[in-house]
Image (cartoon, rainbow, N blue to C red):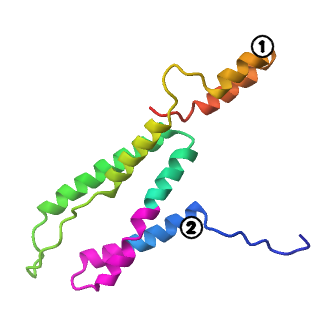
Amino acid sequence: MNGELSIRSGMTSFQLKILACVLMLIDHVAEFLPEMPVWMHWIGRLSAPIFFFLIGWSCMYTSNRKRFLLRLYLASVGMSLIQAVSYLLPPLSSGVMLNPIGNNIFATLFQMSLIICLLSAPPHGTRTTTQHLDLHRGAAHHRRGDDLRRLLHRCPAL
């Protein structure tokens, strides 16, 4: 490459997460502070489709789907508790009532990833590609096939 920097087009998943978080922050500022302009909501609402894309991406490339689903589930339960507390908060000393939190994106992300994992799981009783290949390779390659099978089965759906 003769010392030239190669420029790759597109964004990484990390860059997409940062962009979605910044957009979400703009939306949250507009949601919870009174009299903010409506265009902040419009910009902020672009974060949800980015998060939805990243959930699909993460379901395919995570090393452990069960742990991934558990983390999303726990985040949705935690957010539900925060929602419940937000409805119980009294008005501020100035008499201003804070807006309670009425949505939970973590529950939606958990449900989407659960559906993706269930739909991408092989049907029960069917042979995986590695099992099919093991039958044709014979016993000499059985150990390598078992290692590959264990690797592939680290992230099956529930």
- Residue at image mark 2: 15
Dominant secondary structure of the residues highlighted in magenta in the image: helix
Residue located farthest toward the top when viewing the structure as drawn: 139
Label 1 is placed on what type of residue? Ala
Confirm whether the magenta stretch covers residue 37. Answer: yes
Quadrant of the rendered image containing residue 149 = top right
| Residue at horizontal 56 percent and vertical 63 percent from the top | 14
Q: Is residue 81 left or right of residue 74?
A: left
* Mark 2, other Cα within 10 Å: few <14 / some 14–19 / many ≥20: few
| Residue at horizontal 77 percent and vertical 13 percent from the top | 139
Q: Is residue 132 left or right of residue 98?
A: right
Quadrant of the rendered image containing residue 91 = bottom left
Magenta region: 26-50
Closer to the camera, 130 or 67? Answer: 130
Confirm whether the magenta stretch covers residue 40. Answer: yes
* Quadrant including the C terminus: top left
Q: Position of residue 23 (x, y in %)?
A: 42, 73
Q: Secondary structure at mark 2?
A: helix
